[in-house]
Amino acid sequence: MGLGSKPTIVLVHGAFADSSGFDAVIRRLLAGGYPVVAAPNPLRGIAFDAAAVKALLSSVEGPVVLVGHSYGGAVISAAAAGSDQVRALVYLAAFVPDTGEAVGELVAKFPGSTVNESLKAVPLPDGQVDLYIDPAVYHSRFAADVPAEDAAVYAIAQRPAAAAAFGEPAAGPQGWNTIPAFTLISGADMIIPPETQEFMAERAGATVRVVDDASHLVFVSHPETAVALIEQAAHETAR
């Protein structure tokens, strides 16, 4: 099974974040003996970002459990399509699009998201637009159950996503069509409504855990629950 007897856990952050948010998750996984890789998600568009993650996977020896947060869920769904290496997909408060769906479409499928009114746009010289979560509302809307001082740091360190990424439809088969899915639903999410998360999880036939009062950064506020789901995915899909 590659390195040791456990799969490598590959973590893919979402928009308005970076891999530093996985700190507590990484520490727990390492303590549990798992090899871990944190992928630098470019946040330029699903196809571009999935190609980058897929290239990274080719450098990993042995089986993989691929984990995505938020927009990262769309990226791992595309990156894992057709892969024999990826044994499980774990979605942490994440998008699980079907072919032809855009994350912007999914976020509006059910009421409750505050993401659109929370964005700050930065026009780029090439005509593209980068989007950030306004730091003034980052804590209340993106990370309400994270300590305010920590949320302030995440707001400053956040990486922007290209505006075009949210309107790009998922293309081709999706990894969850053939690979077992596991979903952690954040029950007080103000970015991806819990009802949307439930809809996507049911459609994917996912194994589901719910944290009722969790914000969109559920893996930061409840790392032990996130790790428990990742470990469950690893155990149930071991060959």
Image (spheres, helix red, strand yellow):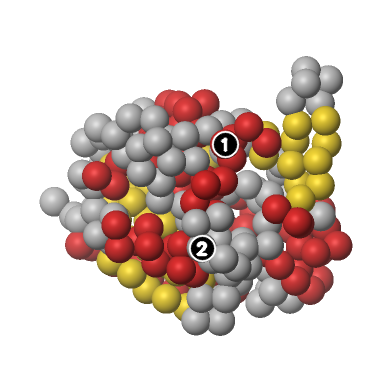
Q: Residue at x 55, y 61 (%)?
A: 192
Residue 53 location (% of width, % of height): 46, 33
* Left or right of residue 145, residue 151 in this image: right
Q: Farthest residue toward the left?
A: 239
Q: Nearer the viewer, residue 134 or 155?
A: 134
Q: Which residue is mark 2?
A: 110
Circle 2 packing at 10 Å, graded few (<14), some (14-19), many (20+), is: some
Q: Which residue is mark 1?
A: 167
Q: Residue at x 53, y 33 (%)?
A: 168
Q: Earlier in the sequence, mark 1 or mark 2?
A: 2
The CA distance from mark 1 to mark 2 is 17 Å
- Which image quarter is the N terminus in? top left
* Quarter of the rendering containing residue 188: bottom right
29, above or below 126, in the image: below
Q: Is residue 176 in sight in this rendering?
A: yes
Residue 57 location (% of width, % of height): 39, 33
